[in-house]
Amino acid sequence: MITQPAVSSFLVSQNVSRMKPSSTLAAMQAAEALRATGANVVDFGAGEPDFDTPENIKRAAEEAMRAGKTKYTATAGIRELQQALIDFYASLFSAHYERSEVMATSGGKQAIFNAIVSLINPGDEVLMAKPYWVRFPEIVAFAGGTPVYIETEENGFVLTAEMIERAITPRTKVAILNSPSNPSGRVIPPGEFQRIMELLADRAIYVVSDECYLRFVYPPAEVFSVASLPAELRSRLCVAGSFSKTYAMTGWRMGYALAPLEWTRAMLKVQSHSTSNPTSIAQWAATEALRGPQESVATMLAEYTGRREWLLKALREIPGITCNEPEGAFYAFPSVRACLNDRLKTSNEFALGLLEQEQTVVTDGAGFGAEGYLRISYATSMEQLQEGIKRIGRFVNSLHRG
Ligand SMILES: Cc1ncc(COP(=O)(O)O)c(C=O)c1O
């Protein structure tokens, strides 16, 4: 007899079994399915760089493997990587971390997961701005917490201290901040970031700052890490970082957490009892990523800069589409609300229509908590961008014609 796969009552009680498949994944699967039919697909769904991992990083992994660095490491990672992270934050942001406050993780996602799971009790509220990265509410639900969403549309999706203040309740335990943001690309200006941290420190609220897109910022916006703020504002702060985007290393699964000693100890327990250390070879590659030449980051940034400029202008020329300026990451997040009508009522229907009519994949903003918006990734070639924008323009025209 075949029995149903079991879902523990723990997962059911945490709403995990009811978790939605992520909208980013849905876009990826739609593109795959269409490609399999031989269609000429333009894919704006990608959440990862279209560049290869730089050669020096690959070489470091190869050398590590040949040198037999293929065994378990400490849960927090190899000393060399911890020290490279400490040196990186000291030289770029004048932030001083001890080794006991630094841990390597399997991707930035695990850093966020460790931080939330180690802190949250059932019923605790976790603040997050809309639009949010799709994983934030799911991780919070997994931990038994309650996501509390902060509307930011009135301010072009830039979170402010005042908005946070209005959302705080006696149950607020943590705020997750993400600047530059996925999906909006918006950046919290350093002065506002400081005000946010002052408010949260004052209310003894913990902070997880997701710095996944730290280095991909377009002037006049500035690269800013919350780690650069005075120590008294960082006593309840966990910085969650990633090698995935900065060094085009999504498949290597390397990230890190910087947090106070006690919190780090708790996170190490979560990691030790689940995944142990990140892959030893990938840790050596990540060490080289931080220590080695940084030209590849500048090259990618220059390429994204050109694409972003072109895309933003082209999007804004399509009647009915408006778009805030994405100051970081590699996404544009336009509104298509003015294009919706009785036939096409939601951004999801817009995305599906675009897929069907023009074989072009975008991600529905509703999955990020922003109905009426779409996420367009420009981690793709200029040719694909040009072709895709032509198709979106044609699709929108067909809607206006009724
Ligand atoms: C906002 C944000 N945070 C964290 C991550 C985690 O990335 P990784 O686990 O690959 O380091 C991603 C990846 O898409 C992201 O977009």
Image (cartoon, grey):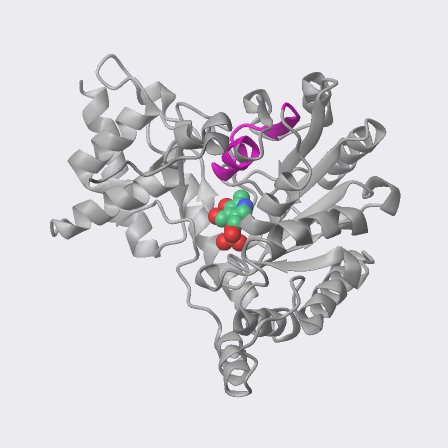
Q: Is residue 127 magenta?
A: yes
**Quadrant, the N terminus:** top left
Q: Residue furthest left?
A: 37
Q: Is residue 259 above or below residue 315?
A: below
Residue 209 position within the rendered picture, expressed as x and y whole percent measured from the top left: 66, 43
Residue 243 position within the rendered picture, expressed as x and y whole percent measured from the top left: 56, 60
Residue at 36% from the left image edge and 37% from the top image edge:
6
Between 149 and 364, the one nearer to me in the picture: 149
Q: Is residue 258 left or right of residue 348?
A: right
Q: Is residue 347 above or below residue 79?
A: above
Which quadrant would residue 121 be assigned to in this image?
top right
Whether residue 213 can be seen here:
no
Q: Is residue 12 left or right of residue 27?
A: right
Q: Is residue 58 above or below residue 89?
A: below
Residue at 18% from the left image edge and 18% from the top image edge:
402
Magenta span: 123-141
Q: Residue furthest bottom?
A: 67
Q: How many marks?
A: 0
Q: Residue furthest top?
A: 342
Q: Is residue 254 left or right of residue 389?
A: right
Q: Is residue 185 above or below residue 380?
A: above
Between 387 and 214, the one nearer to me in the picture: 214
Residue 50 position within the rendered picture, expressed as x and y whole percent measured from the top left: 39, 59
Q: Is residue 161 magenta?
A: no
Residue 333 position within the rendered picture, expressed as x and y whole percent measured from the top left: 44, 35
